[in-house]
Amino acid sequence: MARRDVPLRELLDVATEAALVGGRRTLAWFGERLEPERKADGSPVTAADRDAERVMRQIVERAFPDHAILGEEHGERAGAAPYRWLLDPIDGTKTFVQGVPLYGTLVGVEREGEPVVGVVSMPALGEVVAAAQGLGCTWNGRTCRVSGVDRLDEALVVVTDPREAAARPGGWAALSDEAGLVRTWADCYGYVLVATGRAEVAVDARMNAWDCAAVLPIVEEAGGRFTDWTGRRTIHGGDAVATNAALDGAARRLLAG
């Protein structure tokens, strides 16, 4: 049987459903006293992460049984089609466990290795940002764009963990010194802020593919740029920087040290 080329709008609809349903499942656990376990890499995982990813996978498998799926908690399922879904049920598990609402449920889709669809649901905030390549980016259903700020001394720069960023070779200290304002509203929320024009630069010293897959198309379709610290457009760089495009060169020059 010939492989079906799936329209991006159809992929986006299913990705949105998976992010919303998974996000709603996390709310059933939010605010509870959860005891996180430690995975092999030292990062935390809870019953809420696993529960939400299960329902997300069910939605994708029902819609596209031949598509590959890579989830942070339940691993990879191979597929025959040229599509791979990357799922992160709770991006910001540490934040989630603390009862802070700045966590997200992420769904990204690759077509032949190219990230083409991304959805970030912020369940506790009631925000959803979604994009597909060539179809633009929306924030709660309305078109959104990055800001037009073109001076670092007028920019808001956000970072997930400033200690990790400072420990990395490169110029995080220089970038933060040049910024007009620095805050640690981060994990996926930092990239949502860039895509919706509320921040200009988001930085992470450590990222996995499932952290990035939804964010790259969102930032790009909103008019920004998403790369690793060396400037490669990739979700596999191990770190990330997103900008409103106007500040891309200046931010990455400083990060390069």
Image (cartoon, rainbow, N blue to C red):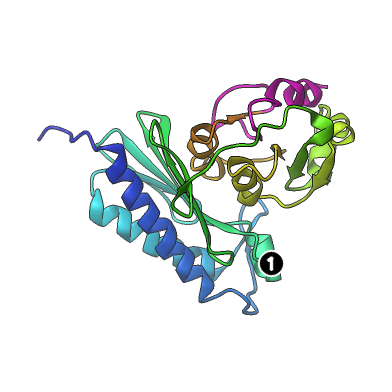
Instruction: Determine the image quadrant of residue 177.
Output: top right
Name the residue located 59 percent from the left edge and 44 percent from the top edge: 196
Q: Quadrant of the N terminus?
A: top left
142 lies left or right of 250: left
Q: Which residue is mark 1?
A: 100
Tag 1: amino acid: Val
Q: Is residue 172 visible?
A: no
Quadrant of the snapshot with the C terminus: top right
Position of 191 compared to 216: left or right? right
Return the residue nearer the eye: 191 or 134: 134
Q: Is residue 131 above or below residue 38?
A: above
Q: Can residue 29 be seen at all in this image of the molecule?
A: yes
Q: Secondary structure at mark 1?
A: loop
Q: Position of residue 79 (x, y in %)?
A: 28, 41
Task: Judge the density around disc 1: few (<14), some (14-19), many (≥20) Cα neighbours within 10 Å.
Answer: some
Give the left or right position of residue 4, taking residue 186 as reference.
left
Residue 104 location in percent, x, y? 56, 57
Q: Is residue 112 above or below residue 193?
A: above
Which residue occupies the extreme left position in the image? 1
Region rendered in magenta: 229-257
Q: Is residue 239 magenta?
A: yes
Please give the name of the residue rendered at 56% of the width and 24% of the height, measured from the top-left corner: 233
Q: Nearer the viewer, residue 66 or 233?
A: 233
Query: What is the x, y in percent for residue 213?
Result: 49, 40
Residue, x 32% and y 50% (percent of image)? 13
| Percent position of residue 203, x then y | 71, 38
Residue 132 within the magenta-colored segment of the rendering? no
